[in-house]
Amino acid sequence: MKKYFFFLSILLIIYFLTAAFNNADWDLWARLAVGKIFFTTGAVLKHDIFAYTPTKPMWIDHEWLSGVVFYWLAEKFGDTGLSLLKFFLLFSVFLAIFRLNQLKFPEQNHYRIIYYGFFLYALMFGFANTIRAQCFTYVFFALWMYLLEKLRSGENKIIWIFPATMLLWANLHGGFFAGLGLVLLYGIGEALNKRRFAKYFVIFAISTLVTLINPYGFKYWPYMISAILVPRPFITEWQPLNLFEPFNTAFGFKIFAIFAIISLFYVFIKKFKDINWAEILLLAVTFWLSLQHIRHNMFFMIATAGYMTGYLYEMFNNIIVVIPNLFRNLSIRGLWLKFTNGKTLKPLGYSHVTAFQESKAPLAASAHNPQVQGDNPKINVMIGNIKDLIIYTLIIIMGTLTIWFVPLKVKVNNTRFPTRAVKFIEQNHLSGNLLVLFNWGSYALWKLYPQCLIAVDGRYDGVYTESFINEVARFHYLGKGLSWMDLINKYHTDIILINTEYDVYKNLLMLNDWKIVYKDGISAIFVPGALKKTNWKIPDEKYNTDNDKFKSPINLKRILN
């Protein structure tokens, strides 16, 4: 019965997290655009059509298949389709880690609802928005961890699953490199374990070859290597992690780091001869990667939950048994020794053998007499059942209320996206080159192409050159002197859509040859001062994009014809 309550509670927790953390991702709209182009033309677009600024001659989109999946779900099922995809991917990560723990520690009770509830909450660092392409990477990473452990136990018949899943992974998200690294570390670890390791390198080689089955062929790898190495100083999640920031920063990562340290201490003390060096290597590498880039925290948390959970619980179970007995066995004798300054009266015939037997007697008694242990099995079972009843009841009540009152929707908040400003541009038929920055570029291209071309969006180094990204940064962060204006002057600009919280907004207000024609709580629109139009249509203040967020004027058939 507990098994069913456990999985029901897990599903309700995932529903709650899916519904509660469901803001549209900044880059969701570019993914949808890729999907719509695919279904319109039957092909993957290999050059950019959305920007008026310099772009790379070939657009290598390592997330193209994610876009196809996202668009199909949004088109067929709307909010529910994308939300349920996120629900399914979250559950898949959980299930892979849960099964991995069952495989590694079959003797343990794995229905730890509080622990796994926290694990799912920690995963929201990578799943926080509606859906992102990297969510597929987290699922495959967890799945491969489980499969590698089964392979380690001798189930060689599952080897085919690795290249089969890699075919999907390499086209869904560029994080497939994490899978190759995982297999490589397992091979090295098994060599250190002095076990057979050749099969891991065979899997690595075959899976690497499978990655070449993509729309770009051999050109995919040079791009991916450069994408891995390129610095991204203007994207927060690609910055190094500072462990000395407030504890609530990267909270989940820090908690799992503590779990890992405690578990590793136990492993090195109690199980050094049985250490699996593949696990140690993976934990070390993912921890180091997490320090290099905040975004990689997810890999370390998944690895820790998969490999260290059983050791953590084993250690605490030993502590629960040992410490009470230790105090119970030493308390009376310790007080007597303290009272006599360490001297004891020994009767005639007392020997070291007798002393040893006396010292072992209390331990033997406590081991075989539950009352001596202070451990009444019936009371413990009753307390455990009451605790479980309270926890599962609360989760089921909260989960049911969430299902009843909180629908699965993709939240396009007017305080996050410039929905009314974009509607203003559309209604007033403003067209041409739209200077908009990273976070809003994706939404603008989805809603305004081909009426407007954009300056830049979150596709970042996949589309735009490094030198141009630096020009955007000078505009965004007000470079020295008048260099911030290069982005306006160097590339013909017809419209500027800017976040009013940016410092550059104040500078734009001071320009004589640009005038503001629209402003709301988060955004402002500037047009050239020479534009004579004065009769502007202002979107209704109650306007929201819920009804048409998945509708876009993108139609490549019309453009190509």
Image: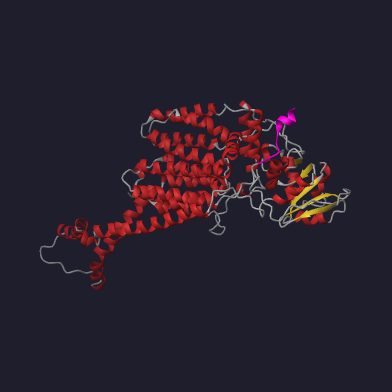
Rendered location of residue 330, percent (x, y): 25, 64
Q: Does 201 lie within the magenta span?
A: no
Rendered location of residue 396, percent (x, y): 42, 54
Horizontal arrangement in the rendering, residue 388 relative to residue 224 (left or right): left
The residues colored magenta run 551-561
Horizontal arrangement in the rendering, residue 412 relative to residue 126 (left or right): right
Q: Residue at x 40, y 50 (%)?
A: 263
Quick check: 465 above or below 323? Answer: above
Q: Nearer the viewer, residue 303 or 229?
A: 303
Q: Does 552 lie within the magenta span?
A: yes
Q: Nearer the viewer, residue 155 or 135?
A: 135
Quick check: 137 above or below 410? Answer: above
State which quadrant residue 221 falls in: top right
Rendered location of residue 175, percent (x, y): 56, 38
Horizontal arrangement in the rendering, residue 156 relative to residue 299 (left or right): left
Any part of residue 175 in sight: yes
Quick one: quadrant of the C terminus? Answer: top right
Q: How is the protein colored in the picture?
A: secondary structure
Any part of residue 268 in sight: no
Q: Nearer the viewer, residue 351 or 93?
A: 93
Q: Residue at x 36, y 50 (%)?
A: 269
User: Across the whole image, how many numbered discs are drawn on residues?
Assistant: 0
Rendered location of residue 490, percent (x, y): 82, 42
Q: Residue at x 39, y 29 (%)?
A: 156
State which quadrant residue 466 falls in: top right
Horizontal arrangement in the rendering, residue 334 relative to residue 557 (left or right): left
Quick check: 302 above or below 392? Answer: above
